[in-house]
Image (cartoon, grey):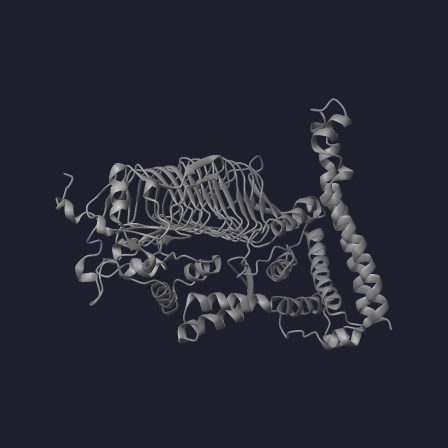
Amino acid sequence: MNIIKKHPVDDLGYNFIDEKYIPEGKDEYYLRNKQNPHADKYRKLSSFEIEVLVRNSNTSDDWNKILVTSLFKPELVKNCKFFGLVRIGNLEPLYLEFHNLRMPVGLYNSTIISCDFGNNVCIDNVNYLSHYIIDNEVMIANVNELASTDKAKFGNGIVFDGEDEKVKVVLELCNENGGRSVMPFDGMLPGDAHLWSRYIADEELVNKFEEFTNNKFDKSRGHYGKIGDRTVIKNCKIIKDVLIGTDAYLKGANKLKNLTINSDANRTSQIGEGCEIVNGIVGFGCRIFYGVKAVRFVMASHSQLKYGARLINSYLGNNATISCCEVLNSLIFPAHEQHHNNSFLCAALIMGQSNIAAGATIGSNHNSRSPDGEIIAGRGFWPGLCVSLKHNSKFASFTILAKGDYPAELNIPVPFSLISNDVANDKLVVMPAYWFMYNMYALERNAWKYIDRDRRTEKIQHIEYDYLAPDTINELFASLQILQQFKPDEDGTATVNGWENTQRKTEILKVPQSISLFNELIQYYGTLKIMEFFQRNKFTSFEELKKNMNAKIQRTEWLNIGGQLMTKDAVNKFKQQVKTGKIKSWQEVHDFYKSQGSVYETDKLSHAYTALLEILHITPRQFTPALLKELLQQLLVTRDWMCKGIYESRAKDYTNTFRQMVYESDEEMNTVIGKLEDNSFIQTKLAELDVLKKQVKQMVRKIAL
């Protein structure tokens, strides 16, 4: 039975906050007045203004509760019902226009309960508008319900005075059993979600994170919903307990409830037709369109949900896009792409620069007696068409999986590998260094495009997009130890156990070539970082360079914290500072990210120098001008084959007969896909190679002096 409560009509618009939750000496408007900085600029209506309002078919339970500003024009308020304290800003004889939506300034055909309005708002046909503060030049048309309750949390994982903890919204990240749950909050970064969920067993640390979140918000009941300047809302059904920034655009949404929608003049957020979005945080510059369903989520800035996507119990990192598919219980780092229907991602930690193909089911079933499986994928994770993976699985960075139904759990420790399920011969096949042998174009272009598409204006976390960085270099070292233990046959093939949870054979291809390539790439990385350091600081001699470089006794361990690479020592020190109270808030956590970003190049240089010495089996004393000259020449050799690989891997698309057969002529093919020689990305990389050659020549001359 629906419980319908009856109250005196004179109470409508009043008693928003239960009396027992109002501080002594305050009234029910004390929080509303804090939220509205112009609360003291209103006046009572004149008798003439009341007469005009009544003549225009407006009603109020108490005209003394309608307050206005000096430029209020009663002629611009028609056919409205007012209840409770309503404050109205300037209304001038104007109309506002946005995307061909033209609306006269004023309040029309609406029921309005205890709201504040800024200057020159356009409100028309809002059937139920309750307890909102609406700023200047906001346009709202055709909304069924726009209301806020006294317990509105706007998507944040908190509880108010007198509430049960059970009502708290949490995100059950990386695992469906809730064992890695975190409390979402406005401003939550990928690193915050990762540190909290990954170190969940550190009770003292987690308690501090909960304390930071609780301290971030006022637990008092009675905050009003807010809509910032110039926001436009049209043709929406239900908007309840939603905090909306400036310059947002909401059109045709079915239901928006318990949300913060961040938006400002430079980072506008938009929500479109048919969306149903509940219990979440929408970051600055986000786009949500066409039938999206999102429940218990955080979207970091400049991310997108489109075309019926479902995002549930998940964190979506910056500059990421999910279309058409379903994502559950996942933590996704920045620069993630998942565009296609039937893609399914469940209970996974995806560490950025990833692309999920059509038909992929990442986490297709659980292999235990409980839904508690997990998948961890390093950055650059690319499962192909219709890939099916089982919990638990773990993948090194830049793993690509060929189309296939993988029958068991996988643990792939070697980065840059192609994984194939050879059904005919009943074996798993792994090809290390695949990207460098056969797909340099995609590897290089992806690194470039992620930088180019990073729309963040506030880069609190320094995100690494280069495929050769401290994390992947460390993986290459670990891979060399693994590969060098193999005894490959004359074709360079070896077998291994423990990479797949089956009794069948796992075959590793091109072992000698991979070992050679990994050695060359580590040397290339170390030399390149040293050269960049030399150029950046405009050194004039080898002695000056060497004096400013420090090698560690041992190569440092690195962690990917929400897309930002940090040394393991720095993360351990950070955790200790949180637990001892030296770091006391999320703002100070974010300051830690900034400080780590500021020393990243220095730390990376030290890592690169140490890695170079290690791969060459030399000490700093043996790092001489003659050796550096030799390394610089080898740098050009490596970069030259990389550029050739970029060209050749793209050229295959032009010479493959099956690609050519849909065109009547080369001219038609070039018209449709563009000429290979006109490819702007390839031309950019070739130009960069020319610059590198000149820089090497200049550096060699300086260190030889």
Residue under the point 29% across and 62% down? 219
Residue 625: which quarter of the image?
Answer: bottom right
Residue 526 showing in the rendered view: yes
Q: How many marks?
A: 0
Residue sitting nearer the eye, 490 or 556: 556
- Name the outermost residue toward the front: 48
Residue under the point 50% across and 51% down? 265
Residue sitting nearer the eye, 192 or 50: 50
**Where is residue 14 drawn, in percent x and y?**
20, 52
Relative placement, left or right, of 605 versus 28 is: right
Q: Is residue 626 above or below residue 15?
A: below
Residue sitting nearer the eye, 347 or 304: 304
- Name the outermost residue toward the top: 664
**Where is residue 143 drawn, in percent x and y?**
34, 38
**Where is residue 160 drawn, in percent x and y?**
26, 59
Residue 434 showing in the rendered view: no
Q: Quadrant of the N terminus?
A: top left
Q: Quadrant of the C terminus?
A: bottom right
Residue under the point 57% across and 65% down? 597
Residue 487: which quarter of the image?
Answer: bottom right
Residue sitting nearer the eye, 235 or 178: 235
**Where is residue 443 drawn, in percent x and y?**
66, 48
Q: Is residue 53 above or below residue 471?
A: above
